[in-house]
């Protein structure tokens, strides 16, 4: 049952991040500069049973067309495309999504 509840908090955080203006996400992705460094959108939630879920949020510019031919999706050469990952720390649960300036 805990995993089902954890999934709810994971989805809620992803939806919350995706409501941010694209310019804010792009700025944070640029500031962080890495898909493996958690951003300031990360937070924690204390559940009724006392468990604390740490929700890590990762952002990176995304190379969707691989025009540079290096096969590295995180080198960020495509303007207007951001990779978003939300995960619950130490759980193995995570969701990923691409978002664009056109959404």
Image (tube, rainbow, N blue to C red):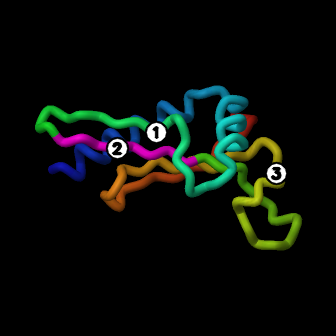
Q: Secondary structure at mark 2?
A: strand
Mark 3 vs 1: CB contact within 8 A: no
The segment highlighted magenta reads 51-58
Mark 1 vs 2: CB contact within 8 A: yes
Q: Quadrant of residue 103?
A: top right
Q: Magenta span has 73? A: no
Q: Measuring 23% from the left and 52% from the top, which residue is drawn there?
A: 3
- Residue wearing tag 2: 54
Q: Measuring 68% from the left and 46% from the top, which residue is drawn there?
A: 82
Q: Quadrant of residue 76?
A: bottom right
Q: Earlier in the sequence, mark 3 or mark 1?
A: 1
Q: Earlier in the sequence, mark 1 or mark 2?
A: 1
How far apart are the alpha carbons under marks 1 and 2?
A: 8 Å
* 101 on left or right of 68: left
Mark number, residue 42: 1
- Residue wearing tag 3: 78
* 8 on left or right of 100: left
- What secondary structure characterizes most of the magenta part? strand
How far apart are the alpha carbons under marks 3 and 1?
A: 25 Å
Horizontal and vertical percent position of residue 37: 56, 52
54 over 69 or under it: above or below: above
Along the line of sight, the residue nearer the viewer: 93 or 38: 38
Q: Secondary structure at mark 1?
A: loop
Q: Measuring 52% from the left and 50% from the top, which residue is drawn there?
A: 85
Horizontal and vertical percent position of residue 58: 55, 48
Question: In the displayed image of the protein, which residue is found farthest to the bottom?
Answer: 70
Q: Measuring 71% from the left and 35% from the top, which residue is drawn there?
A: 27
Single out the mark in the foreground, 3 or 1: 1
């Amino acid at each position: 049952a805990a995993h089902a509840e954890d999934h709810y908090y994971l989805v809620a955080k992803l939806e919350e991040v995706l409501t941010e203006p694209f310019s804010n996400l792009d700025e944070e992705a640029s500031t962080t500069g890495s898909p493996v460094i958690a951003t300031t959108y990360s937070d924690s939630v204390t559940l009724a049973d006392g468990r604390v879920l740490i929700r890590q949020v990762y952002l990176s510019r995304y190379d969707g067309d691989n025009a540079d031919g290096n096969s590295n999706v995180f080198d960020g050469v495509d303007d207007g495309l951001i990779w978003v990952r939300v995960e619950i720390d130490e759980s193995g649960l995570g969701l990923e999504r691409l978002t664009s300036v056109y959404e």
